[in-house]
Amino acid sequence: MGKIYWDKEVPSSWSGEWSEEFYTIPEKTSYNRTADHMQMLEFITAMAWNSEYMHIEQLFISDLRRVAPLIILSKPRVTTPEEARATGKTVVYIQGNIHPSEAEGKEAVLMLLRDIALGKHSSLLDKLIILLAPDFNPDGNEAWEVKNTSTFSGTPRIQSIRHNAVDADVNRDAIKMESLNMQGLYENVLNKWNPIITLDLHSMGRVQHGYS
């Protein structure tokens, strides 16, 4: 394992390239694959072993008993909402993979985690406390289906499903809060950490839109 540089110790000549052990699954596979649940947890664990800024909590346990992690990034490290409030910093919550067929958000959150936790963008923590939920729908992430879309030359592609294990679209559940996913969000993020800014990440389909 190479040397990890903390905060301002990052060399000015650094090329911005991480060693392979810190690559995400898309980066390791020329962006042909996305991380499954265990690969995501392994990546988060690797970050935690190499960063002084991370605290990990349980966001919720899914219908199929998978743990959805909540990662708190702060400098210095905080472990409770009370400690976060004492810093006076703005709390930001970023969520990916509510629709697992739109995996780009999940992978973007993991890349952001790495770039902050290992020092490249740790300056963001000078003014912010950042909460990350890379996989808000772990059961949907693990359920695979084959899609054949005419917008991509008719080539079949394997992707995760949109709904959770009980066939609910979690993205439509913010009011009723019937899903374990949304119940966990309200209980363990919104009512607990009180983020000022929230980002819910999605992606569009494989369609080209022309403009003039």
Image (tube, rainbow, N blue to C red):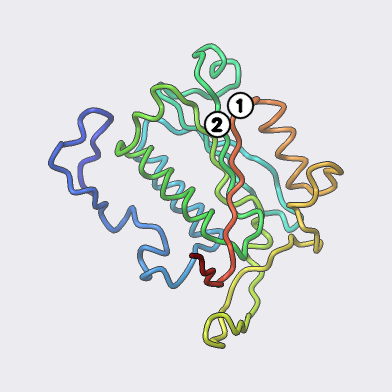
Residue 190 rendering spot, x and y as whole percentages:
69, 30
Left or right: 37 with respect to 182? left
Which class describes the residues within 10 Å of circle 1: few (<14), some (14-19), or many (20+)? few
Query: Looking at the picture, which amino acid does disc 2 mark?
Result: Val
Left or right: 97 with respect to 4? right
Q: Quadrant of residue 159?
A: bottom right
Q: Residue at x 73, y 62 (%)?
A: 163
Q: Nearer the viewer, residue 196 or 151?
A: 151
Considering every residue shown, the one lying at the far front of the view is: 212
| Circle nearer the N terminus (1, 2) | 2
The residue that label 1 is drawn on is 196
Q: Residue at x 53, y 38 (%)?
A: 71
Residue 27 rendering spot, x and y as whole percentages:
36, 63
Left or right: 31 with respect to 173? left
Considering every residue shown, the one lying at the far bottom of the view is: 154
What element does badge 1 sit on? loop
